[in-house]
Structures are given as C-alpha cells and as structure tokens.
DNA sequence: TTTAATAGTGTATCATTTACACTTATCTTT
DNA sequence: AAAGATAAGTGTAAATGATACACTATTAAA
C-alpha cells in the first residue's frame, strides 16, 4: 500500500482548469460570452469563462458547475472539446485546461450577470485578442459545433423553446458561415417529424408573421435521423 | 506576485496521465496494443499503454514520448482523443488522463518489446475486460478514426510505405466494420493523384500478384482532396 | 392604397453513390 | 500438361441525393 502511494507521489501534479466556450444566438448572430479579468494576474485581458476543477468533482461536473456559476443556468448542453496542456500556456503556473463547448438559450441569460462578471456577448467574428490559447479553444469548439449542427439536434439548445424556421436557418448560417437555400432547408426540416409546427405565430420578426416550431425530443428518440 | 502564487495554490492539483490507444493493422485485422500490468497496483489487469506527464512537457510531447518508450518508434501519427476525469476512475489517486489515438505501421514494431512490456496485439473486436475507463477511451478513439479515415489520409500511417489496393481496402473495412465494394473503392482511389501506382508487384498476397501503391504526401498537399 | 419586408411553396437538373459479374494471371495440385 | 484454385483488375446503368431557382401571400407602416 505504501508502494502504491509512492508510485503516484513520484509523479508531478498539475492544476486542472475548465474553460467554457459559451455560445449564444441573438439577432442572427452567433455570439460568445467572454470575460475581461478585473483582477490580477492578467487584469484587463479578455478570456473565456473558466474555473478550477475541485478534488471531489468529475471533469464534466466541473464544467457544469463553472458554467452554472457564470450563467446562472442549469441543464445546459455541455460537450468536451479537448485538453490543452502546453507547458507555458499559463505564465502563472502549470495548468492543464479542459475546454468545453456550451450552448445556451441566450434569452434565459440574465444580462445583469455581465456587470457582476465583467463579461459580455461578442460576435464570434469580431473577437478581441485573447488570453493564451483561448483562441485555439474557440476555433476547435466552433469546428466541433459545425460538425455536429448538421447531424445532431444540438442547435435547438441555442434557440428558445418556440422558434421560427427563419431563426433556425439563420442559426445554421451563422454557425456554418455560409448562406443556405431557403427552400432546400425547409424541405429537409419537413422530413423530420420531431420538428413540430405549432399553431402559434411570431409577429415580431415580420409583418406577415411566421409559424413557430418546437423540437420534440421524445419524438426524436423514436426515430433519431437528423440532417440539416 | 505573492498574491499570484496564492491564487494558484488555493486550487488542488492532480496527476495527469497519458493513455495511448495504439492501432496496428495486420492480416486484415485492426489490432490494439494492450498491456498486462505485471506489478501492483492492479497486477494482471489489461490496460492501455500509458504514462505520466512530466513537469516540463507539453501534453502532445508527453504522448509522443510515452508512445516512443513503448513502441520504440518516432514520428508516429498521434492525435488527442480527449480528457477523462471521473473522480474515482483510478482507485489509487486522483488522475486525469488524456487519451491519444496512435497509428503505427505494425511492420516497424519490434515484437520483442512485447516480452519486455508484457504487451500484445489484440484484435479490436475481441478485447478483454480492461482497466477503469479504458474501454471508453478505445471506443472514442475508434470513432475518431472512423470519422477521419474517409476524409483525411490517415490510414497510410497503418500501412507499410508500399501497399496493395486490397490492403488499403481491407484496412478501411476493418476500421469501418463494413464491407466496401471493390470497384467503387478503386474508382475513388483513381481520382486521387497522390495515391501513386508503382511498377512494383507484391506476390505474397496472391498468385497473380498485385501492383504496389504509395502515398505521396507532397502531391497531396498540392491538392488536398481526400475521399474514400 | 401603395410600399416594404419577410413567409411560404415545388420542380427540374445535376452530381454522387450504389449495385453488379466476368476475365486475367499465376501457382498448386493432380 | 491440364485442371483447379485464388486474388487482381476492370465499366456501366440505375437510383438516390443535392442543388439551383422565382414567384405569391400577408401584414404593418407610410
């Protein structure tokens, strides 16, 4: 047993951090929640929302906790992007950071938190210079999201419970960075029974008004074929 | 500065390990290099090839070093799969493990290392019970490989410098776990100029003999469109 | 009532993917 | 020497999936 302890103790230990790439969608733009550090070290530098992993915490749980602390939200979509472990990626100490892609419905976000955390929503295309390797993490998280958006129903995590097809399409366009043909897009939507048309109409986006749709997860699990 | 140190020291530190999912291909079978631990703790349990990250080492460098220690090979294809950090995933201590997918040309592997490391090559479909979450890592690494094999020229890392088209096809079949139509496969190969036919013939695989091909990386970079 | 702005709808073409079977070359066996 | 066995090598037609494309409907504001 002593031997066992010695086996582990002979190896170094590192801080392990979580960095959250928090995506939101508003006004047709894909946005990222970033934070300006208002304390040393590295005061004033823009960074991702992060925190350290605790002793008694799984990595995924740590991501959910950190995310909850910074957004006030529970039950959000969280997926690991990868581990970042360059020796000098953090000048203060050796820190291995695990990045998580987080998708939230921006309407559920309490904007007052931006005062408290000195954070704000920045368009993904106009990000400032950022802390260490955070730009790499963002690029990797975006690639992950681009890969998933067309094959898995993850985009609905970025939309309110009821949404118009134009919103859904604009979301895909913002994530993929390219225009999509409206008729082809709607044809594909029509093939998925779990994207349900409601009888409610949204009048905020147009004079004519647009039908609101809803994602039915139970129906999706019955026949999980997603393609958009 | 003291404040800075205190900032970091107030957070826990963890062992960080590397686990290598080492793939090889022989006799039409996709194989994994696994190791039976011949020392406590957990003597006799099958596990992936692993090691601990050092203080002065990037994660990726650690993966290459560990991989080199266990296979004797340098310049192998190594890609991160992800970080695994359940609290009790290692009963001996809190260890966060970063898994790496490793592709090697099994012909370059010195089989005598299997004696030294008490390791061996096991078919991916007939793996024994394994250490902690190593089965999860393997599943994730295989998924990564399946995703890449059709869109990037990674498979050549599992083949000798000269290979027949049947070998290449069988490799794809082993990784994807499904049969592929020979004529369609060869049609696609024919569209990629960087898969070059040599005038050499392999007579070991058939009576007739088959032309040997070669992957030309320089040519690939000139026009990097891969689809198989 | 005219204008402006977004919602909503179907078809034809093109490109890609799939299915499919026989001949050739060589070694082995009889 | 002939027959048999084994893997290599080759092209076309049908089906499926992806893309391009333009007008009408509805409502609020001017």
Image (cartoon, coloured by chain):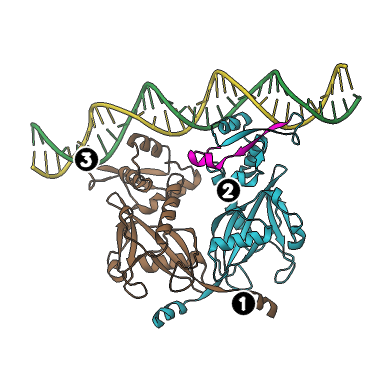
Chain colours: A brown, B cyan, C green, D yellow
| Quarter residue B61 falls in | bottom right
Secondary structure, mark 2, is helix
Q: What chain is tagged by disc 3?
A: A
Give the numbered dot on residue A59: none
Residue A210 visible in the picture: yes
B165, above or below B50, in the image: above
> Quick one: label 3 or label 1, which is nearer the N terminus?
1
Give the numbered dot on residue B145: 2
Query: Which region is colored magenta?
Result: B209-228
Q: What chain is tagged by disc 1?
A: A
Q: CA distance from mark 2 to mark 3?
A: 48 Å
Q: Which residue is mark 1?
A: A9
State which mark lies toward you, 3 or 1: 1
Q: Which residue is mark 3?
A: A208
Q: Are marks 2 and 3 in contact (CB under 8 Å)?
A: no
Q: CA distance from mark 3 to mark 1?
A: 68 Å
Q: CA distance from mark 2 to mark 1?
A: 34 Å
| Quarter residue C24 falls in | top right
- The foreground one among A121 and A88 is A88
Q: Residues within 10 Å of mark 1 (few under 14, many from 20)?
A: few
Q: Locate residue A144, reporting x and y percent.
A: 45, 51
Q: Residues within 10 Å of mark 2 (few under 14, many from 20)?
A: many
Q: Magenta stretch: residue B210 in it?
A: yes
Residue A198 visible in the picture: no
Are the numbered discs 2 and 3 placed on the same chain, yes or no? no
Q: What chain is tagged by disc 2?
A: B
């Amino acid at each position: 047993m002593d031997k066992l302890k010695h086996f582990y103790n002979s190896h170094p230990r590192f801080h392990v951090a979580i960095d959250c790439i928090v995506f939101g969608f508003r006004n047709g733009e894909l946005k990222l929640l970033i934070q300006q550090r208002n304390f040393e070290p590295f005061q004033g530098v823009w960074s991702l929302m992060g925190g350290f992993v605790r002793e008694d915490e799984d990595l995924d749980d740590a991501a959910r906790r950190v995310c909850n602390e910074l957004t006030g939200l529970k039950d959000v979509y969280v997926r690991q992007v990868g581990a970042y472990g360059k020796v000098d990626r953090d000048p203060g100490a050796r820190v291995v950071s695990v990045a998580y892609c987080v998708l939230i419905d921006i309407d559920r976000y309490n904007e007052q938190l931006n005062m408290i955390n000195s954070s704000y929503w920045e368009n993904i295309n106009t990000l400032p210079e950022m802390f260490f390797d955070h730009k790499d993490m963002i690029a990797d998280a975006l690639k992950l999201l681009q890969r998933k958006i067309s094959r898995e129903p993850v985009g609905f995590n970025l939309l309110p419970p009821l949404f118009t097809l134009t919103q859904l399409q604009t979301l895909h366009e913002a994530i993929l960075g390219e225009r999509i043909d409206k008729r082809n897009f709607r044809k594909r939507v029509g093939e998925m029974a779990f994207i349900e048309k409601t009888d409610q109409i949204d009048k905020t986006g147009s004079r004519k008004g647009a039908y609101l749709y809803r994602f039915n997860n139970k129906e999706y699990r019955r026949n999980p074929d997603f393609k958009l």
